Image (cartoon, rainbow, N blue to C red):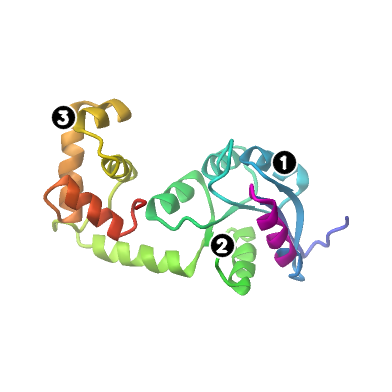
Amino acid sequence: MTVEDNVVRVMLIDDHPVVRAGLRAILDGFEDVCVVDEGEDGVDAGRAVEAGADVLVMDIQMPGVDGISATRNNTAVGGPPVLVLTTYDTGSHVMDAVAAGATGYLLKDAPEDILHRAVLDTAAGRRTLSPDIAARLAEQVGRSGGAGEAGRETLSRREVEILAALATGASNRELARRFVISLATVKTHLIHIYQKLGVENRTAAVAEARSRRLIDG
C-alpha cells in the first residue's frame, strides 16, 4: 500500500475486532488519514515505528498490556504521539494517560469530525482532549483554584490513588501496605486530601471524589 506524504498514518490498537473495523472504516474515510496497521493488545503498539505510523490511536482497557502501560512504553522508545480513544472518562484515567505520555484523550462517542481533528492535532503534537473531558477538567481546576483555602488545591496523583483505595474500604494499615509507606504518612495524605476536598472524613472524601469524577464509582 502506498501512502501519500500529506496523509497521516494511523496505527489502531483495540481489543474488540468489531470496534477496530468500525474505527478503521471511519479513519480511512478521511482523505488525509490512513490506517497502516492495527493490533488488539498494547504489545502490538511496539510495531508503530516499524509500521511508519504518525499516530497511535489506542484504547485503555485491554487484556495483557493495557493502553496506559503501552503509552508509557511507546513514550520511552520515542514512538509516535498517542491519542487515547476510550469509554473511560474519570479524572484519574486522564491523568494517568497524560502522565504516561499521551498527547490526546478522546471518548469513543465523539462525533467523526472531532475524531478527525483529534487525529490531525495529535499527529502535529498538539494536545487534544474530548470536549466533555476538557470541560470536566476545567471545572475541576476551577474547584481547585485559590491556594491556601480548604478544598481549593489540586490533588496529586498519589492522593487520587489513595482515594481510589479508600473507595474499596481499605483501612489505614492496608493503605500503608499497598503503597509501602508508614501509617504516619498515610494519615498525612488523608489530612491533605480532606483539606483539598473540603471534607472531614473518608466517607465524605470518597463521595466528593466520585462527584468530581476523580475516581470510578
What residue do we see at 30% from left, 41% from top? 168
Q: Amino acid at mark 1?
A: Arg
Q: Amino acid at mark 2?
A: Lys
In this figure, which residue is indicated by the disc labeled 1?
47
Residue with the mark numbered 3: 184
Q: Quadrant of residue 72?
A: top right
**Image x and y of residue 76, in percent:** 57, 38
Disc 2 versus disc 1: nearer the observer: 2
Q: Amino acid at mark 3?
A: Ala
Q: Residues within 10 Å of mark 2 (few under 14, many from 20)?
A: some
Among the two numbered marks 2 and 3 on one chain, the one whose residue lies closer to the N terminus? 2
Residue 215 position in % (x across, y down): 34, 51
State the image quarter where residue 136 is shown.
Answer: bottom left
Task: State whether residue 86 is above or below residue 132.
Answer: above
Q: Position of residue 198 (x, y in %)?
A: 15, 56
Which image quarter holds the N terminus?
Answer: bottom right
Q: Nearer the viewer, mark 2 or mark 3?
A: 2
Residue, x 64% and y 59% (percent of image)?
123
Q: Which residues are magenta?
A: 14-26
**Mark 2 element type:** loop
Q: Nearer the viewer, residue 147 or 74?
A: 74
Disc 2 target residue: 108
Queried whether the magenta region covers residue 15, the answer comes back as yes
| Marks 2 and 1, how far apart at CA | 23 Å
